[in-house]
Amino acid sequence: MEQLKKIIAILVLGLIAAPIFAKNTSCLKFGISQSKYTSTALEKEWPLFINALEKASGHCVQLLTFNDQGALVNALKKGNVAMGYVKNKALIEHKKTLKPIAQVIEKNPKTGKPMTSYSSYVIAEKNSSVTSLRDLKNHKIAYTDPYSSSGYTRLKQELSKAGVRATWVQYDNITQALAAVKEQKAAAVGIWDYHFEKKLSNQQDYKIIAKFSSHPTPYLVVNTNQIAPALQMQITSKLAHFKGIYNIVGFKIISNAQP
């Protein structure tokens, strides 16, 4: 009789715990890089998107934060998160299980019109001898984020194409990087064109030596082993007109988001 009571008790506990376990396993893990966003954004703005994603997917969604985009993409690749907000599409190229399913449509801060790409400048101190990318040979280049398209990866790619070797020096933030260029401790730095034109009060201290266009806006990326094609389509169709955080005004569905 005592043995029977124990069996019944175990079964009852199992029935009570089962729904909780099932709910937890059905949650989608969504990742972002924490360093880019303030605590206010994490606490007040991202939950708006998470709520929309829950409604779109029909699943509960757990928001996970990572120190940088590299750590986020690595977690996506390993399946530790099912979906993520990837700012630089180049980071997921040649990764078979990672697929962009939608691209952020942003409100252009300069024109107010929707955009899916932006431009950047490479700037140098106004009186320096550097006037082109080729002049950066054997010089120091300031940067802040090794995963940034405008500040690092695109410039590095273009220098490599031109056969220009330079030394990269990392700074904690763009203010420090700009100061290094102004003081000629570094020869140049890559910067978002809007930041340079609208937010930099002393832009007269610098000169533009190169401009890069067609930096894509961020993407929603999934691990295809975690999210089935049907669910991918369901999510993108319902998030197409999402807006409410930052300057996001919608999502452009990627045509190859389904097999």
Image: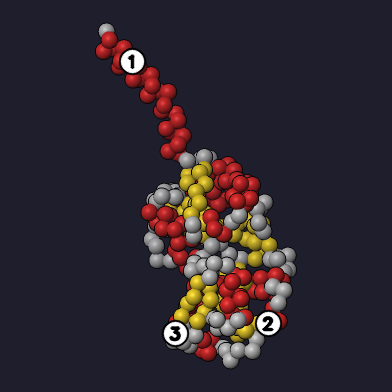
Q: Residue furthest top?
A: 1
Screen quadrant of the N terminus: top left
Front: mark 2 or 1: 2
Whichever of labels 3 and 2 marks the residue nearer the N terminus, that label is: 3
Q: CA distance from mark 3 to mark 2?
A: 25 Å
Query: Relative to residue 189, is residue 226 depicted above or below?
Result: above
* Residue at 50%, 51% in the rendered image: 65
Mark 1 residue type = Ile
Nearer-N-terminus badge (3/1): 1
| Residue highlighted by disc 3 | 165
x and y, in percent, of residue 184 in the image: 58, 83
Q: CA distance from mark 2 to mark 1?
A: 78 Å
Report the residue marked by disc 2. 205
Residue 2, picture quadrant: top left
Residue 74 location in percent, x, y?
41, 58
Q: Amino acid at mark 2?
A: Asp
Q: Secondary structure at mark 1?
A: helix
Number of other residues with Cα within 10 Å of mark 1, as a class: few under 14, some 14 to 19, many 20 or more: few
Which image quarter is the C terminus in? bottom left
Q: Is residue 11 above or below residue 252?
A: above
Callout 3 touching callout 2 (CB < 8 Å):
no
Residue 106 x, y percent position in the rendering: 65, 61
- Measured Cα–Cα span from mark 3 to mark 1: 72 Å
Local packing at callout 2 (Cα closer than 10 Å; few below 14, some 14-19, many 20+) is some
Residue at (48%, 88%) from the top-left corner? 137
Which residue is rendered at x = 44% and y = 58% of the image?
71
Residue 162 visible in rendering: no
Vertical comparison of 244 with 94: above or below: above
Furthest-bottom residue in view? 129
Circle 1 is placed at which residue position? 8
